[in-house]
């Protein structure tokens, strides 16, 4: 009953119908939720100050019609529609509303052709175009939060929010702004009944920076659980975002959490809140300074016996905002009515409401909360940055919503550790370099190999010859150029890319790839062609052209790789980490060349070269060519060693460099060493030259010998055919007679039949005594066939094979008469 009487007293004071001077009434609806009743003293004080203002403000009187929203959307809309239906024609809706009602009322204002002047926070300006609040929006608080994170370079945070209509919109806006600022939200927890379980998930994810969007009554409970879970101290930082102005209010929620525990948990925490009063000493539009208003408001509160509201200053400025805008509109309407031909212009017409909207957008005056001005419908003011130090809040900075600049006084900040907490474990990156001793040794060896190769190249070019040996000399030149490229790749592999220009590392990676790949292809293609000539025993007419074709295929593949997916230096993070101090580890990084599709290109290049190496090894096995196997073994070993030792640049360079240089030196000593050794042994220069020429002409000589053997084989085949025809011809029976000299002569007196079988069934079979019997034919062939075989075997027939050719007939010089066949 006392509360009702108090409200009637307040309304009686607000609706003063007996002014000292004639003042024009301006009816305004005041939507008053339960919490706004504490703002009655501030509103009453503003109405009293308006009475003492000169014209034009003093010419008008705001008549507030109370409207209880009951914090229910349906009841609020019903009460609003009833008030508009009953009249009078209201120009403005004043006051706040519950968070659950505010979005609904704000969306209905354009349809109702109303504007609202409020002192409650708003978030979504898309639906709140007709709402003007003297309290900064939640979006400004989120902007200040993001600026604070950027100030201390915090990019990894955890967020804990409380459920509610207002905080839900605030949470969505914060998510968008954090994503735009590239801040990683590790865990986003909603405050449930079990507060400690939500904080425990933050601890499990090693969250160091915690942002809390909490109501005032929940802050103490959250900090109490943070104390129990040890989410405090130098490793953690709490940032509490609250749209109110009450400051720190720490009250123990249960006996287990004392005031000292809360202070320990909240020590060093930062709170973002709206500035309650301006910091100027000059009087504003009401004629009062912020401090003068504060004193008058407290006296009024004591006089009425009510409580202090944290939003009283914003309610005071909201009354002045409404009065100033309405007075400007009414003065404009009077001028229009005075100079218009129509004298019955209504002050509640469509043009009046448009003028009122423009007046609110262009408002700019000095209030007790600071400058009152709007940009895109949002109040421009300051957000305070307060840090809890020694059980009291210290103002350490502010965020100006007009300039969007954060100002932090570093000399006032106090942290539990040596400085601000880190958002994660600090990783000290240490890049591994090639040892100077290793690079110096290998570069010297590579330089010596290059010098030897250049010397051999000069001698080879100096004694060049014309004729068939030109192709062999071209192969030798290609081999030497491949050795030069392979040795140069060792020199380039140890260069430090960090000390070069920004574009040089990419070029250096490409040069290494080309030098190593083309060098291997040049060496192996020459050795492969030499082995192929010996294997096929034929002359490759253009061996240099074949080697050039292989090089062109390799260059085409490398060119596609370089143009489509160029190589660039990429850091390779190593697994082992060394702990230096708390929250600091050393991360070893090795730099290597890579590209987006590195595995695909490596598979293509290695597949092409693996096929070439496999074919070369098969050919080399048939002709026992040692050089091909050596190059293949060294190449595979260097590739595997480079991949397995990528984590250590010094070992990688040492292993691959030694393998490549050993391979190059082996080829030089194997192919060109004997020539120089023979010259040093004292042999004449001309003999050495002839030997070199003979070695160079080995291929053509083998080709000529092969052609001669083919021709001789053809001749022997022709002779064999002629002898077979002669044996098949008819001949006379063979008779033997004794001459005077004691020798016998053999004559053929019948046709010799050399046939495998008699196809005439009517003919009688041959008798064993016949001269054309199979036994006699076999005897004759046993004498003739060895002679033919000797023609095919230039080296003769060994004694072991003579048993194949046995004589089954014998000629006795003492026998008379014809030779009888053996049975």
Image (cartoon, helix red, strand yellow):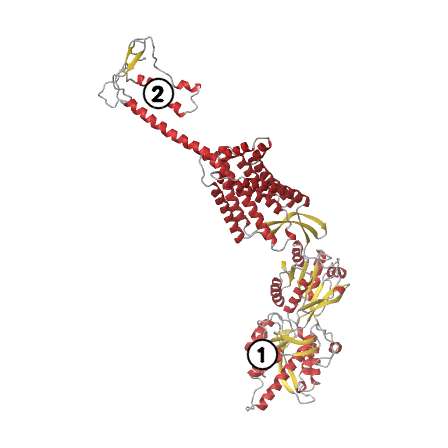
Toward the viewer: 228 or 426? 426
Q: Determine the image quadrant of residue 704.
A: top left
Q: Can you say which quadrant of the picture contains the C terminus?
A: top left
Task: Please determine whether, in this image, residue 375 is positioned above or below residue 764.
Answer: below
**Percent coordinates x, y for residue 524 in the rendering:** 52, 40
Q: Decide: few, some or many residues near mark 2? Use Cα within 10 Å; few <14, some 14-19, many ≥20.
A: few
**Percent coordinates x, y for residue 793 in the rendering:** 41, 24
Task: Report how far apart the C-alphas of labels 1 and 2 lie in the structure.
Answer: 132 Å
Look at mark 1 in the image and give the residue it sits on. 114
Toward the viewer: 366 or 189? 366
Task: Please determine whether, in this image, residue 207 is positioned above or below residue 536.
Answer: below
Write the residue at 34% across / 12% down: 811
**Percent coordinates x, y for residue 564 in the rendering:** 52, 53
**Percent coordinates x, y for residue 435 in the rendering:** 67, 45
Q: Secondary structure at mark 2?
A: helix
Q: Secondary structure at mark 1?
A: loop
Q: Decide: few, some or many residues near mark 1? Use Cα within 10 Å; few <14, some 14-19, many ≥20.
A: some
Residue 85, numbered circle = none
Of the two numbered discs 1 and 2 in the rendering, the one whose residue sits closer to the viewer: 2
Look at mark 2 in the image and give the residue it sits on. 784
Write the residue at 34% across / 28% down: 718
Task: Please determine whether, in this image, residue 480 is positioned above or below residue 320.
Answer: above
């Amino acid at each position: 009953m006392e509360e009702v009487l108090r409200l009637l007293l307040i309304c009686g004071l607000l609706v003063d119908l007996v002014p000292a001077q004639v003042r024009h009434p301006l009816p305004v609806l005041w939507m008053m939720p339960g919490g706004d009743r504490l703002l009655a003293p501030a509103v009453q004080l503003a109405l009293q100050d308006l009475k003492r203002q000169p014209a034009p403000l003093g010419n008008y009187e705001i008549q507030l019609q109370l409207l209880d929203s009951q914090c229910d959307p349906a009841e609020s809309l019903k009460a609003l529609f009833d008030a508009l239906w009953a009249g009078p024609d209201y120009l403005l809706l004043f006051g706040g509303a519950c968070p659950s009602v505010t979005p609904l009322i704000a969306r209905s204002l354009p349809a109702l052709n109303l504007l609202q002047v409020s002192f409650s926070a708003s978030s979504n300006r898309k639906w709140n175009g007709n709402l003007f609040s003297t309290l900064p929006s939640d979006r400004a608080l989120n902007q200040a939060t993001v600026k604070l994170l950027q100030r201390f370079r915090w990019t990894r945070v955890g967020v804990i929010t409380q459920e509610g209509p207002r905080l839900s919109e605030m949470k969505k806006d914060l998510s968008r702004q954090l994503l735009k600022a590239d801040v990683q939200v590790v865990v986003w927890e909603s405050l449930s009944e079990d507060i400690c379980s939500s904080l425990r998930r933050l601890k499990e994810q090693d969250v160091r920076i915690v942002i809390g969007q909490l109501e005032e009554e929940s802050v103490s409970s959250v900090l109490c659980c943070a104390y129990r879970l040890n989410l405090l101290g130098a490793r953690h930082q709490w940032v509490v975002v609250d749209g109110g102005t009450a400051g720190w209010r720490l009250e123990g929620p249960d006996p287990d959490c004392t005031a000292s525990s809360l202070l320990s948990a909240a020590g060093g925490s930062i709170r973002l809140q709206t500035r309650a009063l301006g910091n100027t000493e000059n009087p504003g539009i009401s004629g009062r300074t912020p401090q003068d208003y504060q004193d008058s408001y407290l006296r009024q509160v004591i006089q009425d016996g009510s409580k202090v509201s944290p939003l009283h200053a914003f309610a005071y400025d909201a009354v002045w905002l409404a009065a100033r805008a309405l007075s400007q509109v009414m003065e404009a309407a009077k001028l229009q009515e005075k100079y218009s031909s129509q004298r019955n212009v209504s002050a509640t017409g469509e043009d009046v409401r448009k003028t009122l909207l423009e007046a609110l957008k262009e408002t700019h005056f000095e209030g007790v909360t600071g400058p009152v001005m709007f940009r895109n419908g949002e109040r421009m003011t300051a957000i305070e940055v307060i840090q809890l130090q020694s059980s009291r809040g210290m103002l350490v900075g502010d965020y100006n919503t007009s300039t969007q600049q954060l100002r932090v006084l570093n000399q006032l900040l106090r942290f539990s550790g040596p400085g601000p907490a880190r958002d994660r474990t600090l990783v000290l990156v240490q890049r591994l370099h090639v040892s100077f001793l290793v690079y110096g040794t290998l570069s010297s060896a590579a330089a010596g190999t290059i010098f030897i190769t250049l010397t051999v190249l000069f001698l080879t070019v100096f004694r060049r010859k014309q004729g068939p040996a030109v192709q062999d000399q071209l192969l030798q030149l290609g081999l030497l150029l491949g050795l030069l490229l392979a040795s140069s790749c060792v020199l380039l592999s140890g260069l430090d890319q960090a000390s070069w220009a920004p574009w040089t590392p990419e070029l250096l990676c490409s040069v290494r790839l080309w030098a190593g790949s083309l060098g291997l292809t040049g060496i192996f293609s020459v050795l492969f062609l030499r082995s192929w000539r010996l294997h096929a025993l034929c002359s490759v007419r253009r061996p240099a052209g074949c080697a050039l074709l292989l090089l062109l295929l390799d260059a085409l593949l490398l060119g596609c790789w370089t143009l489509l997916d160029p190589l660039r230096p990429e850091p390779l993070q190593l697994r082992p980490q060394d702990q230096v101090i708390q929250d600091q580890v050393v991360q070893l990084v090795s730099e290597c060349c890579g590209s987006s599709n590195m595995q695909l290109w490596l598979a293509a290049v290695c597949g092409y070269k693996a096929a070439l190496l496999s074919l070369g090894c098969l050919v080399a096995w048939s002709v026992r060519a040692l050089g091909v196997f050596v190059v293949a073994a060294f190449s595979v070993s260097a590739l595997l060693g480079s991949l397995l030792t990528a984590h250590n640049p010094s070992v990688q360079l040492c292993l691959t460099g030694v393998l490549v240089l050993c391979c190059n030196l082996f080829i030089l000593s194997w192919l060109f060493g004997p020539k120089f050794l023979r010259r040093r042994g004292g042999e004449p220069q001309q003999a050495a030259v002839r030997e070199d020429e003979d070695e160079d002409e080995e291929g053509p000589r083998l080709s000529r010998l092969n052609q001669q053997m083919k021709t001789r084989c053809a001749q022997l085949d022709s002779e064999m055919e002629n002898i077979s025809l002669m044996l098949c011809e008819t001949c006379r029976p063979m008779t033997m007679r004794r001459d005077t000299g004691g020798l016998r002569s053999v004559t053929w007196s019948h046709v010799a039949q050399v046939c495998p079988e008699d196809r005439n069934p009517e003919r009688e079979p041959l008798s064993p005594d016949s001269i054309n019997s199979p036994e006699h034919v076999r005897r004759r062939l046993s004498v003739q066939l060895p002679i033919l075989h000797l023609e095919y075997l230039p080296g003769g027939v060994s004694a072991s094979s003579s048993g194949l050719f046995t004589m089954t007939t014998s000629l006795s010089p003492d026998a008379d008469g014809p030779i009888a066949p053996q049975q």
